[in-house]
Amino acid sequence: MAISPPGGPIIRQSLIETILILCKASGGRTRNRVALMDLRGTDRKPSNLVLECVVLGRTERAILCDVSPTGCRIEMFDGVVPQRGSTIVFEVRDPIYFAGEVVWVSGNEAGVRFTRPLSPEVSNALEL
């Protein structure tokens, strides 16, 4: 997507950056978030799995709120929230792991883009 701010050069943006800009512009209202979810490349499946994860060098717990083969939305326990750009590693069960990069943070929720699409083994373990 290309945008041209008044008096400025054309700027190239990724889809996720565009979604973040639209969320901020909308004040983060839920109705707009649902509409923006339609812009995702893959459908997400609702979930309520609690997973152990390693973020910022610490083992934490997170609720997997929704998940797709390429990303997920999580809610962190105990107010520990990863920073945008940090790597997070999830353990489904030993020895099944998957990892991703935190692409947005809002309150105690975060969006994660997986390092690579989920393997069949991980997808099965997550019951996708």
Image (spheres, rainbow, N blue to C red):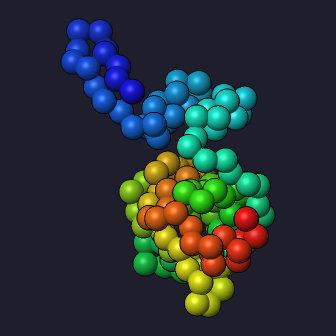
Q: Quadrant of the N terminus?
A: top left
Residue sitting at x 73%, y 54%:
45
Q: Could you say where residue 96 lies in the image, as x and y percent from the top left? A: 59, 84
Residue sitting at x 31%, y 30%:
12
How many marks on residues? Answer: 0
State whether residue 121 is above or below residue 63. below
Q: Quadrant of the C terminus?
A: bottom right
State whether residue 42 is above or below residue 86. above
Q: Residue furthest top?
A: 7
Asked if residue 82 shows in the view, the reply is no
Quadrant of residue 79 within the rendered picture: bottom right
State whether residue 11 is above or below residue 95. above
State whether residue 84 is above or below residue 54. above
Q: Could you say where residue 38 lies in the image, as x and y percent from the top left? A: 64, 35
Q: Residue furthest bottom?
A: 94
Q: Could you say where residue 83 lies in the image, as x and y percent from the top left? A: 44, 58
Asked if residue 16 shows in the view, the reply is yes
Residue sitting at x 70%, y 35%:
34
Q: Is residue 58 left or right of residue 14?
A: right
The front one of 122 and 93 is 122
Q: Residue furthest front?
A: 120
Q: Is residue 112 left or right of residue 127?
A: left
Residue sitting at x 76%, y 55%:
46
The front one of 84 and 36 is 36
Quadrant of residue 3 within the rendered picture: top left
Q: Could you say where residue 115 lies in the image, as x and y percent from the top left? A: 44, 64
